[in-house]
Image (spheres, rainbow, N blue to C red):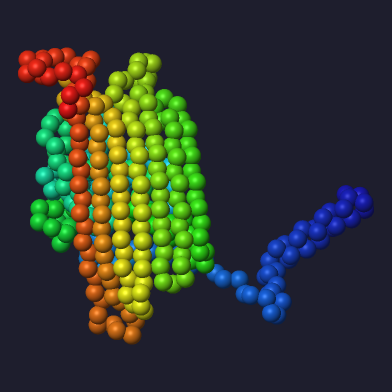
Amino acid sequence: MSYSSRRALFALGVSLLALTAAQAQPAAAPPAGRPQPESEISLDSVSVTATKTAGPAIDALSGTSVVTQAQIQRVQPSRLSTILRDVPGVITQESQTNPAQAINIRGLQDFGRVNVLIDGARQDFQTSGHNANGVFYLDPELVGGVDITRGPTATIYGSGAIGGVVAFRTRSIDDILAPDETAGFVQKQGFGTNGQTFLNTSALGARIGQAADLFGQFTYRTNDPYRDGFGTLVRDTGNALTSGLAKLSVRPADGHEIRGTALLQRFDFANAGSSGAGARFANAVQADTYSLGYRFARPDVPLVDLSLNGYTTTTRNALTFLADSPRGTYGRLGTKGGTG
């Protein structure tokens, strides 16, 4: 090897040694007077469905899963089934002609076997037909998180819930504002083809010091009938949704908090009933939930943690007989198109 080649290799070795030493050198501490960098702390998901008190999901003595807001935002769901599809032991039953959902836990569903809660309000809407008996209506854009408890331990939320409990938490001010922020606005719009047409979600929140905070959200979604893999239009697979969510929390004194929630949803769609055949109806579903709660909890009073909650929930479906439907039984009864 020539002298020039040995000199080049020696220079290359010195350069690599210097680069390694530079990479191994620890980062210099920030100058005095500057804030020290904070290390990230990862906390376990908190569940409240297993025992009705907040605690790590891993410590729950039952099959418990938590779906966080970050997970929901990552999948960008258009139906609730997308949110729950990765939860062990949980499946959803749905129809392409109806935005309603039914939840099955470990093979059990319907007739109250799975307790579905929205902000603590139990959903008991039932309709008899060829599909699920117990269904509920909730747009995924309104969901801030989900707690799922599998098994009969869910009976602490009411008799009959031997399959489990699925507790949906609607979005709140903490989902759009950081702890040090006082006001904010989030706007989301989406466009799609072959079914999913348009989505608009507007959410805003404001904090009035430590005394109160206010949150509101408006959602509008439209879906057109989609075409299958052969290019055939699947009738009655479109729907429209208009919903509004409002939350108010007031803290009149240290340890005291009063919370109020109003959730209003309107779903409009047409179908031929749960069997998918026969007479067609226009469905106008109004699903409203109102809740009011009070809590007293203070660190200096460790023996008292009082929580009171009340709610009212209604689901109404107004059916209108469509003129292009086969007459059949309805025709013999004298029913005409456009009658409810």
* Visible residue check, residue 106: no
**From the viewer's perspective, is residue 54 above or below residue 221?**
below
In screen coordinates, is 113 left or right of 285?
left
Query: Count of labels shown?
Result: 0
Residue beneath the point at 25% across and 82% down:
303
* Visible residue check, residue 141: yes
Q: Nearer the viewer, residue 229 or 198?
A: 198
Q: Position of residue 45 (x, y in %)?
A: 36, 61
Q: Position of residue 241 (x, y in %)?
A: 34, 37
Quadrant of the rendered image containing residue 173 = bottom left
In screen coordinates, is 337 left or right of 10?
left
Q: Position of residue 132 (x, y in %)?
A: 17, 36
Q: Nearer the viewer, residue 12 or 272?
A: 272
Residue beneath the point at 17% across and 27% down:
340
Q: Residue furthest right?
A: 3
Residue beneath the point at 9% across and 17% down:
334
Quadrant of the rendered image containing residue 265 = top left
Residue beneath the point at 16% across and 59% down:
157
Q: Residue furthest bottom?
A: 300
Q: Nearer the viewer, residue 64 or 331?
A: 331
Q: Position of residue 287 (x, y in %)?
A: 25, 44
**From the viewer's perspective, is residue 201 above or below residue 292?**
above
In screen coordinates, is 186 left or right of 45?
right
In screen coordinates, is 80 left or right of 31?
left
